[in-house]
Image (cartoon, rainbow, N blue to C red):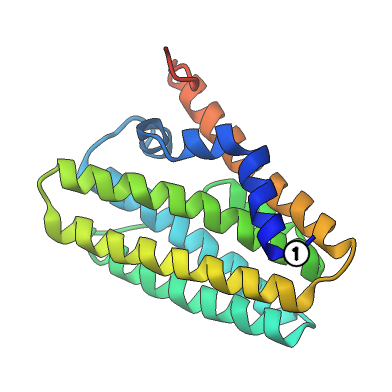
Amino acid sequence: MDASDLVDEVRDERETELSRLGSSKSLFAATGGEMDADAVLAAAADVAAGARDAYRGWADDEDHGDAAALFADVADAEADRYETIAGELDDHDPDPPRVYDHLDGLDGTAERIGGLLGETLVTDAHLGQVVGFFVGDADPRTASTFRGMGDDVEDRLDRVLDLADGALDGDEFERALAAADGVVGAAYDEYVDSLETQGVNPKPVC
């Protein structure tokens, strides 16, 4: 297995979950049903704050130099993203999604690379919906801001895969795969819980 196989397997195994996390219901779940601009901004800021803190913690105690450098870079980028989003709000007290508690529990370079991969795929799906919301809200400036953030997250995915190819070998890829799968699963479980709490069916109605 190499990094390309790794991301392909995550996408294949979690195709349904990633599709639903990239659906319009994902914003409804993240905002608790409050589909207005401030609620969407607050939910996006919560994601950035959770990622910032999780990756900053990893960077501080990671032994693999290249991994530590990438975690630090991602933490800095998420800090900038948080400041940009929170700057659009009158006030914001971060309440990160539960998936970041799951990330905090990952230990070991392979598991963390896999966790970063899984979170990157989830965040990419989420940001696509945020862009769509602001396009529909006739706010092209904010839509463009989030589109740029989405481009940055896509670039991050390439860096994660390069790191995986350079840092992982043998069964380490399997450990990374299990960690990535677990992160996507944790994000999806939170999505389902939020929708069911609101009385919404998390599955699309055909």
Which quadrant holds residue 72?
bottom right
Quadrant of image for the N terminus = bottom right
Residue 2 location, quadrant:
bottom right
**Viewer-proximal residue, 181 or 62?**
181
Judged left or right of residue 15, residue 202 is: left
Q: From the viewer's perspective, is 109 left or right of 37?
A: right
Residue 165: where, in percent of width, then height? Answer: 72, 73
Image location (x, y in percent) of residue 192: 54, 28
Residue under label 1, please give it. Answer: 2
| Residue found farthest to the bottom | 65
Furthest residue toward top: 206
Residue 145 seen anywhere in this rendered image of the structure: yes
Residue 52, above or below 61: above
Q: Is residue 21 above or below residue 122?
A: above
Image-based side of 104 in relation to 130, left or right: right
Residue that protrudes farthest toward the left in the picture: 138
Residue 111's x, y, as percent? 77, 61
**Is 162 drawn above or below residue 39 in the view shown?**
below
Residue drawn at (29%, 52%) of the image? 41
- Please tell me which residue is depicted at 42% across the width and 13% down the height of the picture: 205
**Quarter of image, res 100:** bottom right
18 with respect to 41 (left or right): right
